[in-house]
Amino acid sequence: MIFNWFTYRKYPDFWKNYLKSFKQKQPKSIEETRFVVFDTETTGLSITTDRILSIGAISIAKNSIDVADSLEIYLKQDEFNTETVEIHGILKDGNLKKISENKAIKQFIEFLGNVVLVAHHTAFDIEMINAALKRMNLPKLKNKRIDTGILYKKLANKKDKLYNLDMLCDEFTIPKHDRHTASGDAFITALLFLKIISKLKKERTVHYSDLFRTSNNKGLI
């Protein structure tokens, strides 16, 4: 306990405030929960050697996307992979305002608080953020998280396979504007999240806790 206390004292203020936010009582309904849908664009797919190029995040509350409650950050690129530019379009220099990784992660954490995180194929984006936190000598993200790919499998008659974002955009007729930008993909995923929940509610009663179950659709009440 002494070690934990001294470790806590060494944390920067923004991380202490982040930890304190989890002491607040959490709502237990879908409508009352603040969800933050986010995406990262990166120099590649390696958690250890690649770096984050941009972070996009947007909030959902009361079943509505709150465009005013959003975040878009571009990071300075010490690591650069020309092969991925044609995917995300982010140049090493360019005219975009960019900040350091430490400042970007600080802004992202301050934006989050104790929200529920949502992303499509969440694991990669979470691990990229956690890798950046580790470089800052900070622990991993504490937020609950929902993967829209897993959530989609809770719908009736859906097979247990991987569904990429483009496939689900086509199924739910979601326009692919700004696809492969962090903020664009976050907005698209937010629309997808709401559409999946709406369809789930038409099939059965959906409780807050159901969103976090990773079993197949038989696990829903």
Image (spheres, rainbow, N blue to C red):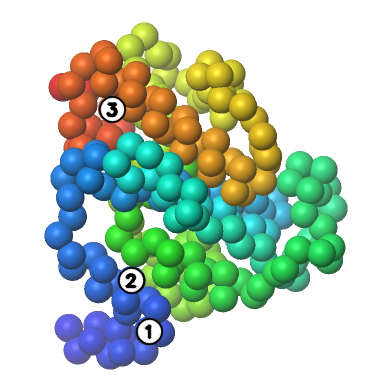
- Which residue, as the protein is rendered here, is positioned at the far front? 68
The image quarter containing residue 193 is top left
Identify the image quadrant of the N terminus: bottom left
Q: Mark 3 points at which residue?
A: 215
What residue is at 28 percent from the left and 27 percent from the top? 215
| Residue 196 visible in this rendered orientation of the protein | yes
Q: Nearer the viewer, residue 48 or 25?
A: 25
**Residue 212 percent location from the top left of the image:** 27, 38
Q: In the rendered view, does 83 fall on the left or right side of 97?
A: right
Q: Point out which mark residue 22 bears.
A: none
Check disc 1 and give the amino acid type.
Asp
Q: Which residue is disc 1 drawn over?
A: 13
Rounded to the nearest angstrom, the CA distance separating label 2 from label 1 is 9 Å
Q: Badge 2: how crowded within 10 Å, few (<14), some, or many (20+)?
A: some
Counting from the top left corner in percent of width and height, residue 59 is at 42, 49
Q: Which is closer to the viewer, label 3 or label 2?
A: 2
Question: Looking at numbered disc 2 in the image, what kind of residue is underneath it?
Answer: Tyr
Q: Position of residue 60 (x, y in %)?
A: 38, 45
Q: Which of marks 3 and 1 is nearer the N terminus?
A: 1
- Using a 10 Å C-alpha cutoff, classify the residue at mark 1 as few (fewer than 14 neighbours), some (14 to 19) or many (20 or more): few
Foreground mark, 3 or 1?
1
Q: How far apart are marks 3 and 2 (CA)?
A: 30 Å
From the image, tell me which residue sits under label 2.
Answer: 18
Q: Label 2, secondary structure: give it.
A: helix
Q: In this orientation, which residue lies closer to the viewer: 129 or 1?
A: 129
